[in-house]
Amino acid sequence: MNEKKEISRFVVKRFPRYYRFLTKLKQNREMRISSGELAKRMGLTASQIRQDFNTFGGFGQQGYGYNTAELCDSIAKIMGLDHPHSIILIGAGNLGRAVAGHMNFKDYGFVLSGVFDKNESFTGQIIKDMPIRNLSGLENFCKDNAPQAAILCIPDTEAEKIVPQLISYGIRAFWNFSHYDIALNHQNVCVQNVHLSDSLMRLCFDMKQSQKQ
């Protein structure tokens, strides 16, 4: 595998779907699958799948197919899921509680190490066996535990204030549910934005376009 090769963002976006699908095959004890069968089940082409996998050195053997468990494990390593990163959650309102309560972080490369909110009435409440901490203790917590990433489930005005602080505490990656554009003002961090409203608007657009056909 060539570590320095430029990887297409489109390829990167497809790999979580490969991982989810192969995880199900692994759980169902389907030990082997060809690129053609994988393509058929996923609605892709066999050549696209082979091209994507060849980006990272290629897997499987011609006429033999892929060992699903080995391929699943290889993709996990490519994505960094085999070495979980410490992540904290900022914002323990309805959205934050839903994210913390329903995500199995360890399956996706992270360990939730702390939950924070500025609302003092939340302090001490339990989310997923973890007490909510007040934001006043965030700096000391980061010094003691060195989290690598943060989930932002707060309004964009609050996110704009706290992101520089988090960066100064050593956090360089954000799963951002706010509408604050982190990357615009902080170029040297990793950001994945989750805009639920954007997704809903795209669905609305798709429905409008389908009505024209």
Image (cartoon, rainbow, N blue to C red):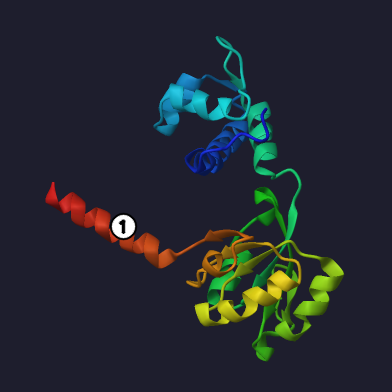
51 lies left or right of 2: left
Kindly give the residue lying farthest to the right in the view shown: 144
Q: Identify residue for label 1.
A: 203
Q: Between residues 80 and 55, which one lies in front from this camera angle? A: 55
The quadrant of the picture occupied by the N terminus is: top right
Residue at 54% in and 72% down: 95
16 lies left or right of 70: left
Tell me the kind of residue under disc 1.
Leu
Residue at 83% in and 78% down: 140
**Image location (x, y in percent) of residue 18:** 54, 36
**Above or below, 87 relative to 68:** below
Q: Between residues 21 and 194, which one lies in front from this camera angle? A: 194
Q: Between residues 90 and 128, which one lies in front from this camera angle? A: 90
Q: Between residues 70 and 171, which one lies in front from this camera angle? A: 171
Residue at 31% in and 57% down: 203
Q: Secondary structure at mark 1?
A: helix
